[in-house]
Amino acid sequence: MRIDIVTIFPEYLAPLDVSLIGKAAAAGILDVRVHELRTWTHDRHNTVDDSPCGGGPGMVMKPEPWSEALTQIVPPGTEDGARLIVPTPSGRPFTQRIAEDLATASHLVFAPARYEGIDRRFIEAAAERMPVEELSIGDYVLAGGEVAVLVMVEAVGRLLPGVLGNAESAKDDSFGHSSDGGMAGLLEGPVYTKPASWDGREVPPVLLSGNHAVIARWRRDQALRRTSEMRPDLIAALDSAALDKKDRAQ
Ligand code: SAM
């Protein structure tokens, strides 16, 4: 997958060189390119913003540099498979399902803004060329979209074949699918490692029993309990076909 990120703070994206995503890039699974938006300005001050039409506080990012950047990164006629992602608190909430969907694209271009965001006309014009997703990573306002890009690239990148050491591990993650036989839309319950006894606290004996069916049932019960406590909305949204009789006893 190719990923292009246009920003006025390229250094903010340095963590993409580290850990899973850095390794995926080194292995050629991901081709990540970070671009400085000011490359596409033509005035002495490399201006990327101006005052908002209609007045009010703050500044708005000008459409011209964004448009030139997108045209150079995705030249007309090469839009097939490309998608533009615009992080914004006013966007659709970014979820695991959206990460899974984005993981099927061949080319993602991210447009993280600063100030009050990007002039609307850029987003409208881009949408005439390729699918545009305006996505929010949560109900709070960040100073800029770079952190949101890091969140989304990591969530999408770890789903690409060959990125996780053990492809099975994603199946047991929170927000899994019922068809995975994993947590089926639930949150993952508590996890433990060795030593079996630490600081007067014991690993639940069932996990040391070696009985895989009993362990799977215990994990499922813990996932149900945790989801009820932390995110009752997820339980309410579960397809009842995804629950079995033993789940209902919870
Ligand atoms: N005036 C905008 C509003 O109220 O919707 C907020 C602009 S914010 C200060 C600047 C930029 O940070 C946004 O354009 C977006 O790129 C990014 N940003 C801030 N919060 C975000 C969030 N929750 N999710 C995704 N991006 C966010």
Image: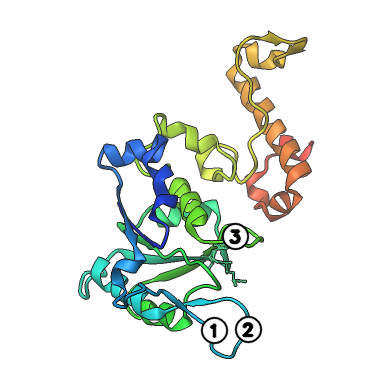
What is the x, y in percent for residue 5? 37, 59
Q: Nearer the viewer, mark 1 or mark 3?
A: 1
Instruction: Report if the CB atoms under discs 2 and 1 are less than 8 Å apart.
Output: yes
**Spatial separation of the CA atoms under disc 1 and disc 3:** 19 Å
Above or below for 202 versus 183: above
Q: Residue at x 72, y 42 (%)?
A: 227
What is the x, y in percent for residue 138? 62, 58
What is the x, y in percent for residue 78? 21, 69
Q: Is mark 2 within 8 Å of ligand 1?
A: no
Give the residue at mark 1: 52
Residues packed near mark 1 inside 10 Å, few (<14), some (14 to 19) or many (20 plus): some
Question: Secondary structure under badge 1?
Answer: loop
Number of marks: 3
Left/right placement of residue 154 relative to residue 218 reads left
The foreground one among 204 and 8 is: 8
Instruction: Report if the CB atoms under discs 3 and 2 are less than 8 Å apart.
Output: no
Q: Residue at x 55, y 43 (%)?
A: 176
Give the residue at mark 2: 56
Q: Amino acid at mark 3?
A: Leu
The foreground one among 44 and 137 is: 44
Residue that sits furthest to the bottom in the current view: 54
Quadrant field for ligand 1: bottom right
Give the residue at mark 3: 142
Quarter occupied by the C terminus: top right
